Amino acid sequence: MNKAVFLDRDGVINHPKRHYYVYRKEDFIINKGVVEALQQLQEKDFLLFVITNQGGISKGKYTRDDVEQVHAFMEKELGRHGIFFSAIYYCPHHPKHERCLCRKPEPLMLEKAMAQFDVDATQSWFIGDKQTDVEAGKRAGVNTLKIRRNKNLRKVIKDIG
């Protein structure tokens, strides 16, 4: 079985500095320490996943294509440093507009990743900046780490290994 680190996107990987909804690559700013932290996790043989709520799709603020373009940009930028995600999962729903089973704190996105990539929950982690991230991780049976929004990720992963 594999071990994995699941990461929330906005506030963990990137800095939503000027925009609540980050859906343009021009607004995607990688947080300090992300490159080094993800390189270290890969060196420890962790699979990396992004698990993100993107409710702005449901609200009509942006499209799935916008989100996928941002994700392609993120993968390209991090790929330059040898960082590769096994998969990126996102929930396009917003509770004010529709009900779903995938929006965090529901664990469905994590459960899909664990099933598709043969991930051992007991050796895996979810890193997020919101309580919904922690709840999703706990419901999926993985270890959780709640960090301050936009915290230097390199400084907080020392206990993951």
Image (cartoon, rainbow, N blue to C red):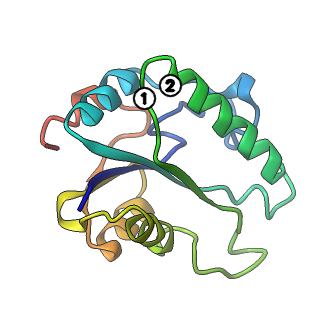
Mark 1 and mark 2 in contact? Answer it, CB < 8 Å.
yes
Where's residue 130, x and y in %?
43, 55
- Residue beneath the point at 23% across and 35% down: 156
Vertical placement of residue 75 versus 98, above or below:
above
- Residue beneath the point at 58% across and 80% down: 101
Question: In the rendered picture of this protein, how many numbered marks are placed on residues?
Answer: 2
Q: Secondary structure at mark 2?
A: helix
Vertical placement of residue 18 versus 92, above or below:
above
Q: Which dot marks residue 153?
A: none
The answer to which image quadrant residue 89 occupies is bottom right
Q: Residue furthest right?
A: 60
Type of the residue with mark 1: Ile
* Quadrant into which the C terminus falls: top left
Horizontal side of 57 relative to 140 (left or right) equals right
- Residue beneath the point at 47% across and 41% down: 85
Where's residue 145, x and y in %?
26, 51
Vertical placement of residue 101 versus 10, above or below:
below
Q: Which residue is mark 2?
A: 78
Say few, some or many: other residues with alpha carbon within 10 Å of mark 2 (under 14 / 14 to 19 / 20 or more). some
Q: Secondary structure at mark 1?
A: loop
Q: Residue furthest top?
A: 80
Type of the residue with mark 2: Leu
Q: Which dot marks residue 83?
A: 1
Q: Earlier in the sequence, mark 1 or mark 2?
A: 2
- Residue beneath the point at 15% across and 35% down: 158
Where's residue 94, x and y in %?
70, 68
Where's residue 119, x and y in %?
30, 63
Viewer-nearest residue: 11 or 119: 119
